[in-house]
Every structure is written in structure tokens, then in C-alpha cells.
Amino acid sequence: MPHLNAQLPFEGRLRLVQRCRQCAISHVAAEMGIARACASQWVNRWRRHGELDLHDRP
């Protein structure tokens, strides 16, 4: 079950990370309508722990 206040569901976070591999985080964040800090947070989590850390936390 997704977090009620989440701006991006898991699939959106995964798409964000994939797009950030080719473009700058700030550009991707602007295209997706989220803050750069939020995008950076998800990319950093993915870099540390992979795809599993993109899921909602309990």
C-alpha cells in the first residue's frame, strides 16, 4: 500500500532513478514536478541500497 502523502509511487521513483542516469537530477525533478531535494533523496537511496530502498517504509 503506497504512503498516502507520497508524491511518487514506487514505479515513479524507479522511473526517476532511471532517468537520472542520463540527465541531471534537477532537470528530471522539474519534468516530474517534484523538488530537487526529493529527487536527490530517492537517487541517493537507490545508490546505497538499490531498488529495494525505493519502496515505502513502514
Image (cartoon, rainbow, N blue to C red):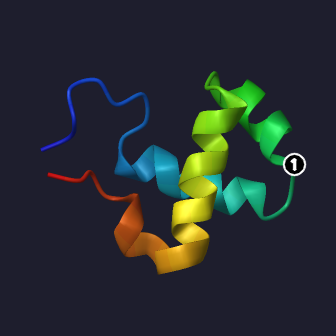
Quadrant housing residue 38 = top right
Number of dots carrying numbers: 1
Secondary structure type for disc 1:
loop
Q: Residue 16: where, in percent of width, then height?
A: 61, 49
Q: Residue 26: where, in percent of width, then height?
A: 82, 37
In the image, residue 21 sits, relative to residue 49, either above or below, namely above
**Residue 10 placement, left or right of 29:** left
What is the three-letter code of the residue carrying label 1?
A: Ala
Judging depth in this view, the residue of 4 and 37 nearest the camera is: 37
In the image, residue 31 sits, relative to residue 24, either above or below, namely above
Q: Which residue is denoted by mark 1 in the rendering?
A: 24
In the picture as drawn, the residue positioned furthest to the bottom comes out as 49
Quadrant housing residue 33 = top right
Label 1 Cα neighbours within 10 Å, binned few <14 / some 14-19 / many ≥20: few
**Residue 54 placement, left or right of 46:** left
**Residue 23 placement, left or right of 36:** right
Judging depth in this view, the residue of 51 and 44 nearest the camera is: 44
Judging depth in this view, the residue of 48 and 3 nearest the camera is: 48
